[in-house]
Amino acid sequence: MMNAWIVGTMVAVVAGVVGFFVVMRGSAFAADAVPQGAFAGAAGASLIGVSTLVGLSVFALVGALGIGLLGRRGRHDVATALTLVTMLGLGALFLSFTTQYSAEIFELLFGQILGISASEILPVALLGLLCIAAIAVCYRPLLLSSLAPEAGEARGVRAARVELLFLVILAIATSMTLPVVGALLIFSLMIGPPAAARSLTARPGRAMALSVVIAVALTWAAIAASYGTDWPVGFFVGTGGAVCYAGGRLWAVRSAARRRRGTSPIEEVATAGAA
Amino acid sequence: MTGLLHAVFAPGFFASAPVHLALLTGGVAALVSGVVGTFAVLRGQSYAGHALADISVTGGSGSYLIGVSPLLGFAGVGVLAAAVMDMIGIRRPRGRDLATGIVRGAGLGLAALFLFWDTTHTSTTGVAVSVLFGSMFTLSPTVVPLVIACGAAALAIVAVLQRPLLLSSASPDLAAARGIPVRAVGLACLVAIALAVSLAALTIGTILSTALLVGPAATAMRLTRRPGRATVAAALIGVAVTWLGILLAYDSFTWPPRHGGWPVSFFVVALTLAAYVLAQLAGRRPAGRSFAGRGSGGRGSGGRGSGGRAFAGREPAVPPPGPAQPAELGRARAAEFRMER
């Protein structure tokens, strides 16, 4: 149980930070596709008998690079969809080769945080630190190219390169979070809390901090609820993320109605994106 | 000669009833997905299509729980989710993806719960696999009328709304100026996508139904710039890919490493990808290259917004309505299709 709290907290912090950029950049599809595709890597790893984390990382990286490179030529959402589908097709093939039971597949897809062991904490912590460090180093270019790509280009921030870098960070975050909350629901943790935070505040730094706080609170509540009811964690994280977002939107609408004037540019971007 | 025939079509392929059923339902699903997928790709809604497929897991797993036909669950929840996505009502591509994601997250949370109940309260342990990866060879013949009805409904929506859909995809502002209810048309398109996706979800599995929706349509758009031709080409490619996939899967029963056969989903996806890559290689012409720079800015969908704004500037001079295709529409289509390259 202690392990679940520790790992859950680390995952929530990383998801809150990375998710902030996912929301700012509008790359929800990529944030969705990388974890789901990486799930196939776990199936492949169990087939050849290496650690699941290795399989996840390899597939997450390949997926991120595939999305980034294919997306340069042609449409981005099509490239993402095709990359995802290819990885999942491989996953289906791997699964048909192994004799694993559906319970384990269910676990990989929907997560099993309560069953995490102490030896799994260290790799997750290292990958999490790597992620946060990468974000810290590239904070300004990432933010600039997310908010104003044209201004970023003018200052010499190469949008395509930043995009690729961001996808790689996303891949690292994915491989650490996947065994914990599961492939299909990492995404809720990366989208719900940051989206809510962005509705609540206009400043990037504050929004990121708030996003981390909401993500951690959501994860803790989900673990406690899951422990109490024995229902899957994914259910509480998924629906909780949507509730956070709905709450954030409501608050944003009400506060926007309260003060019609004096909005800062970023808030305008935020509300325009949400409207 | 017979030896060659047997090498291609493993003995029993044409006599097996499950194969007939798989060919029929798979063909219908591929046809409908190809046609609807053209519009999904055109409108930049590949993600919505994928999310709706994922969300229909909720319907699929829920239907096992209360004991109704999975297709009914798939389609019902899919249409409901499409309505919710539209209700959140996010127009700009960036925010739209976010809304799609939120709905998807909530839907999957419920799916996790339903699947959990499926596996614990009833003894149907294979549900997770069957819902996610499909069960083409184990379909029951009773689903055929439902499959055809859903497919026909999706096709009818697209056929009736073809013109307004194309115009509102290319330039929402121009469409609005012409009195087209852009929002209602968008919702109808989402419903059509949801129906098509639930069909594909039933045949090649929820996750991989994205392949039939996006793959053939994207391939067709590499081959031709005209929406009509692209629709037909996408349907043909989809059906060809699905049937070939079924054939290969049937043949693979004798392949290594295990005598259980390779999954249909794998073959369909591999063939789809191969078709896309081939089309990309074939379609790389000098004319398309000049636009590559525009599309390479990272987000393809961003370009559409600026295109729409360009038309909005010209909008006050309302073009005279007439039976002939207006020049704007032609230009809008051309601009839209050039964006693909």
Image: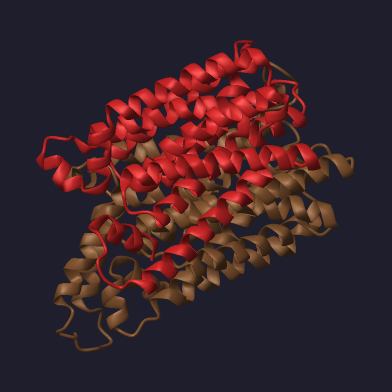
Chain colours: A red, B brown
Along the horizontal axis of the image, is A26 left or right of B16? left
Vertical arrangement, residue A84 with respect to residue B28, above or below:
above
Q: Residue at x 57, y 59 (%)?
A: B196
The picture places residue A55, in percent across and down from the top left corner, at 54, 19
Q: Nearer the viewer, residue A168 or B214?
A: A168
The residue sitting at the left extreme is A154
Q: Residue at x 34, y 25 (%)?
A: A134
Vertical arrangement, residue B178 with respect to residue B119, above or below:
below
The picture places residue B30, in percent across and down from the top left corner, at 56, 52
Q: Residue at x 42, y 74 (%)?
A: B183
Along the horizontal axis of the image, is A190 left or right of A92? left
Q: Nearer the viewer, residue A13 or B257?
A: A13
Please say whether residue B286 is visible from this viewpoint: no
Along the horizontal axis of the image, is B51 left or right of B45? right
Q: Quadrant of residue B168?
A: bottom left
The quarter of the picture where the N terminus of chain A appears is top right
The picture places residue A68, in percent across and down from the top left corner, at 33, 34
Q: Quadrant of residue A63?
A: top left
Please say whether residue A228 is visible from this viewpoint: yes
